[in-house]
Amino acid sequence: MAHCFVEEAEKILDKEFPVLNKGFVRLVDYMGSDERIVQAARVSYGKGTKSVREDKGLITYLLRNDHTSPFEQVVFTFHCKMPLFVARQWIRHRTARLNEISGRYSVMNDDFYIPELADISFQSSDNKQGRSEEEVPEEIKKKVIELFKEDQKRVYSNYESLLEQDIARELARINLPLSLYTEWYWQIDLHNLFHFLRLRMDAHAQKEIRVYAEAMYQAASTVCPLAFEAFDQYIKGSVRFSRDELKALSRMLEGEEHGLKGRDKTLFESKLSEGRQL
């Protein structure tokens, strides 16, 4: 089985996709392509036995019916730089292999995340992990940014002072904040990347990790465009309904009220709204 070479992917290898104020995503390597997915699925057939149209149909069928193993044949290696708080959300996806810069061995750079004024928000009153859509007054936004900058400057200055006194790096680093940037190499197969993107590109995901997912989507889609077209159709651009919600949809199609109440009603109607937006 020959090495998969994708011309569009080769053009963006090692290209930095800027993210946030000092972060980036780089696709540094890939293994496989759309061709590898269909080769794995048609293991008894040789290269060139099917047309692009038939390959697209097969990839779509595999994704739509959750036949995931052929997608695991495609692997990506990314080099990413992100704030620590983003990395700690990211690491929850335990289906990848990674190597992260170590503050025990290296002196951490004076690189911190500062949000844009437009991204300063109040706490949501009905979502414990989300932001409110209520507008924050300009003077409060500016004060928040100044507090971030002051704290970051003070803490990093103390970090440098500890290093100058030859305090061990593994101790000197412990007060560095979550806004500090870290870096890692992150390797993942396409099946698990799709799972990551489904969750982290969702509108409910925190913006600071969502923009990384969007950059990875942009880079990885050059490697296997047919697979990503199927992902857009059946995962990214879709809404899932429970058994009771499907019954409610049936009632609505018959001109009746959907019949759901309380939290079930709220969730169902939000899915309907999301579906209309898609």
Image (spheres, rainbow, N blue to C red):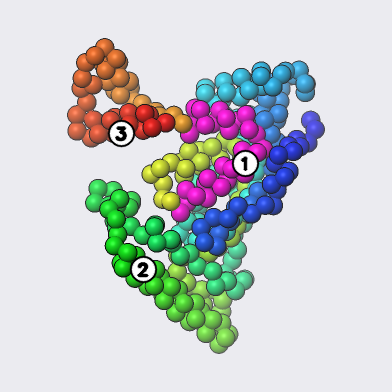
Residue at 73% across, 37% down: 6
Earlier residue among tags 2 and 1: 2
Q: Residue 276's spot in the image, x, y percent?
A: 36, 28
- Range shown magenta: 208-236
User: Please, is residue 209 above or below residue 140 in the view?
Assistant: above
Q: Amino acid at mark 1?
A: Ala
Q: Is residue 73 visible?
A: no
Q: Amino acid at mark 2?
A: Lys
**Spatial distance from mark 2 to mark 3, Cα to Cα?**
34 Å
Disc 2 packing (10 Å; few <14; some 14–19; many ≥20): some
Residue 61 location, quadrant: top right
Q: Residue 166's spot in the image, x, y percent?
A: 58, 85
Residue at 39% across, 57% down: 119
Earlier residue among tags 1 and 3: 1
The residue labelled by disc 2 is 142
The residue labelled by disc 1 is 220
Secondary structure at numbered mark 1:
helix
Judge from the rendering whether residue 29 lies leftward or rightward of residue 160; answer left or right: right
Q: Quadrant of the N terminus?
A: top right
Q: Quadrant of the C terminus?
A: top left
**Circles 2 and 3: CB atoms closer than 8 Å:** no
User: Please, is residue 212 above or below residue 269 in the view?
Assistant: below
Magenta: main secondary structure: helix
Mark carried by residue 270: 3
